[in-house]
Image: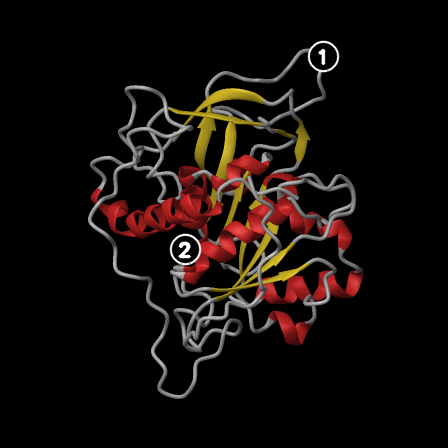
Amino acid sequence: MFTLPLLALTLSAPLALADPRILIFSGTANFRHESIIPATNALIRAAKSQGLIIEHDTTGEKFTYADLSAFDQVMFISSHIDALNNDSRAAFYDWLVKGGTFIGVHGAADEYEAPDWFWDLIGARFSYHPEQCNATYYSPESTPHESVAMLPAKWWWQDEVYNFLRDPRTIGAHVSLSVEDNYLGVGQAYSDHGTPHPIAWYQNHNRIGGGRSYYTGLGHRVEAWSDPLFLSHITGAMQWALEGATTRALNASALVGQANAPGEPLWTRPAALTSTAAPASTSSTVSGQAASMGSGQENVGERTAMWTWAAVAVGAALGTVLL
């Protein structure tokens, strides 16, 4: 095993001005997950081959009207809006109103004093979780979302199974990933997340500004962020949100995002590779169930192939990350 230091926050490889710019915020106001830094490192590595620029903010200093206007996407990886002051929250809200895209991961739904609009952005508030456990996850949609289409149809995965105080479907979110059984625990706190049990979901047009937003309750463990399939889940959500074309990455007239130089073409995702099937043998698959959730779905293959490839490359290079 080796210790991997936090990577440079801006990628060193030359990138076109049209490349999407993503801000990972990792400030916390209560419990701080050990997986935050490994997650950031893994995504920076994946971004290198995908034409994305990732920057990292631990304090909220980038949450100003001027600075946020240059970003196409903001990610909260187990971070908290509670860690932002009122001025920073106002700038973030304004950026969302103008079409910014958002990805929330795991503990991002575990907030103490978040404003109501943030819960509409996330979709639901964390209630509690039982002890870490292995569980079977699946797509409840007839056509799996591209963020899960590369996963096995029945995905055996170890994580914290989050329970929530609201069903995200009540505000128009679509559940992309569910978990079998309730995993409610005995004598635990109240939850009201509906059925099937939502774990990850997406909003085609969030209730604040119309940009796309995505949340997944997975990602607690450090080891998750070196798993190829799990990384495909996260990067698939990132790409899907950008493809809503509400930022300058794919819309030259948008109000926020990385600005293009005169005559510079808009961002295009790398050409898909030929293989889209989930790996036949990984630590997160069930024996005999290598077929992916998206098998036979022609509309997801092109978009998931290159992210699966990127995640496999990241998983191979990353190894075990220690804080």
Estimate how packed mark 1 is, as few (under 14), some (14 to 19) or many (20 or more) residues with alpha carbons within 10 Å: few
Which residue is the extreme one toward the top? 186
Q: CA distance from mark 2 to mark 1?
A: 39 Å
For the C terminus, the image quarter is top right
Question: Residue at the spot x=38%, y=31% of the render?
Answer: 139
Q: Is residue 285 above or below residue 43?
A: above
Which residue is the extreme one toward the front? 1
Which percent across, then down, holds residue 57?
Answer: 67, 61
Q: Is residue 85 above or below residue 169?
A: below
Q: Nearer the viewer, residue 107 or 141?
A: 107
Question: Residue at the spot x=32%, y=48% of the render?
Answer: 309
Q: Nearer the viewer, residue 109 or 142?
A: 109
Question: Residue at the spot x=36%, y=41% of the render?
Answer: 145
Amino acid at the residue labelled 2: Gln
Question: Residue at the spot x=70%, y=70% of the render?
Answer: 64
Q: Earlier in the sequence, mark 2 or mark 1?
A: 1
Residue on which disc 2 sits: 239
Residue on which disc 1 sits: 187
Q: Give the number of the disc on residue 161.
A: none
Q: Nearer the viewer, residue 174 or 10?
A: 10
